[in-house]
């Protein structure tokens, strides 16, 4: 379901390994993607037209522990637009590729739970980076509403266990902050043609 994030991680690591990057550390069950002058994780963020539109980042406890232990956490976020599978052909292909139906899917079918619409394509427009070297830095981003706490806090994993709350990233609020010349948060971007 989240192939865009895996695609971006693969492409980014391929480039960054040539610059000396290695696999990042693990805190709890969260393995961060990359170590290169600090700890980095890669995320994809298809833009939507509604709300603040927060992208899921990582487990709050793992991020806080990483920041305390390593003195750095940053994200590279692939921002773009998704093309959704409106005719169901991508889902058919995806179902054939993934093989047998999982217990989670069977349970959802018995509850008449609708399958999420898949993203059939992604048009990368910009790569945003944002990094923190202290809890103070992180709190500035929270105060500016660029980051948010508690995403997925009331949701469940496919095995039924409670999800740990995650930080979220708002591209729109980040863009407004940068445009206004915020300057207190280490951040930047590269447009993709």
Image (cartoon, grey):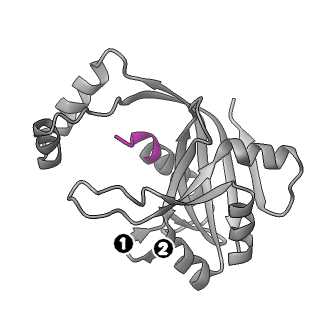
Q: Would residue 101 be found to the left or right of residue 159 on screen?
A: left
Foreground residue among 38 and 87 = 87
Residue 120 in the image: x percent, y percent? 40, 26
- Residue 167 is covered by the magenta coloring: no
Residue under numbered circle 2: 62
Picture coordinates of residue 41, whole percent (x, y): 54, 60
Q: Residue furthest right?
A: 181
Horizontally, is 50 left or right of 104 in the view?
Answer: right
Residue 38 position, x and y percent, is 64, 72
Figure check: 169 above or below 94: below
Going by the picture, which residue comes out furthest to the bottom? 69
Going 74% across and 71% down the picture, which residue do you hit? 137
Does residue 18 appear in the picture of this structure? no
Q: Which residues are magenta?
A: 1-5
In the displayed structure, would residue 28 be above or below residue 187? below
Give the residue displayed 45% in from the left and 43% down from the top: 7
Q: Residue at x 60, y 37 (%)?
A: 51
- Using the image as rendered, state which of residue 70 and residue 177 is in the foreground: 177
Callout 2 environment at 10 Å: few (<14), some (14 to 19), or many (20+)? some
Which residue is drawn at the image coordinates 17% and 47% (left, top)?
104
Cα–Cα span, label 1 and label 2: 8 Å
Instruction: Report which quarter residue 84 is drawn in.
Output: top left
- Which quadrant of the structure image shows residue 149? bottom right
Q: In the structure shown, which secondary structural element does the residue marked by tag 1 occupy?
A: loop
Q: Residues within 10 Å of mark 1 (few under 14, many from 20)?
A: few
Q: Are marks 1 and 2 in contact (CB under 8 Å)?
A: yes
Give whichever of 120, 166 is nearer the camera: 166
The answer to whether residue 155 is visible is yes
List the residue tagged with mark 1: 29
Going from N to C along the chain, the mark reached first, 1 or 2, is 1
């Amino acid at each position: 379901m989240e192939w865009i994030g895996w695609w971006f991680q693969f492409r980014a690591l391929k480039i960054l390994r040539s610059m000396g990057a290695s696999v990042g550390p693990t805190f709890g069950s969260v393995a961060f993607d990359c170590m290169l002058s600090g700890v980095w994780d890669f995320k994809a963020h298809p833009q939507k037209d509604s709300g603040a539109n927060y992208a899921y980042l990582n487990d709050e406890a793992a991020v806080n522990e990483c920041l305390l232990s390593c003195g750095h956490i940053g994200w590279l976020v692939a921002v773009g637009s998704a093309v959704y599978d409106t005719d169901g052909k991508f889902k058919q292909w995806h179902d054939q590729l993934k093989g047998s139906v999982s217990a989670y899917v069977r349970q959802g079918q018995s509850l008449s739970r609708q399958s999420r619409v898949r993203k059939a394509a992604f048009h990368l427009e910009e790569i945003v980076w944002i990094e923190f070297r202290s809890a103070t830095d992180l709190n500035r981003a929270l105060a500016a509403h660029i980051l948010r706490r508690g995403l997925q806090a009331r949701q469940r994993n496919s095995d039924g266990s409670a999800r740990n709350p995650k930080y979220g990233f708002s591209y729109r609020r980040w863009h407004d902050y940068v445009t206004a010349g915020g300057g207190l948060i280490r951040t930047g971007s590269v447009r993709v043609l």
